[in-house]
Amino acid sequence: MNANESSRAAFSIPSILAVVAAVASFNVGAFFGLLLAGLAVVLGAIGVVLALSPKTRGGIFSMIGVAGGIIGIIAAVIKAIMWLLA
């Protein structure tokens, strides 16, 4: 194998799924929103760990998924409180 060959780094599947789960958590009810937001945080954390490899991109993308998941958790809790008070 030639040392000058460079393979293009690819985004990891968990980083992509983290962002998708974070976005989807805003479009469902409180319970499933909480589940999807938690999934986004977990997948984002896995994506950050995988991004430490030089063959994988997506560290920032994974952090966006984690941040979206945290915001999704807050939104799900607010939805649940509003549902209980209504």
Image (cartoon, helix red, strand yellow):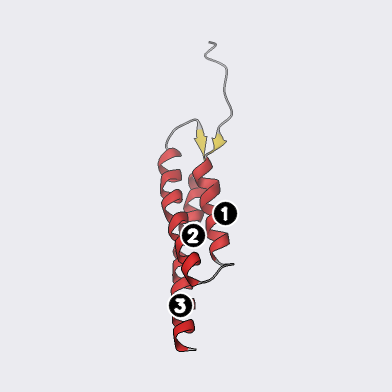
Left/right placement of residue 26 relative to residue 67 reads: right
Circle on res. 20: 1
Secondary structure under tag 1 reads: helix
Residue highlighted by disc 2:
36
Give the amino acid at mark 3. Answer: Ala
Q: Earlier in the sequence, mark 3 or mark 2?
A: 2
Q: Earlier in the sequence, mark 3 or mark 1?
A: 1
Q: Amino acid at mark 2?
A: Leu
Where residue 7 appears, as percent x and y from the top left, is 57, 24
What residue sits 45% from the left and 50% below the top? 44
C-alpha gap between disc 3 and disc 1: 22 Å
Q: Nearer the viewer, residue 26 or 2?
A: 26
From the image, tell me which residue sits under label 3.
80
Q: CA distance from mark 2 to mark 1?
A: 9 Å
Residue occupying the point 40% across, 41% down = 49
The secondary structure type at the circle numbered 2 is helix
Q: Which labelled disc corresponds to residue 69?
A: none
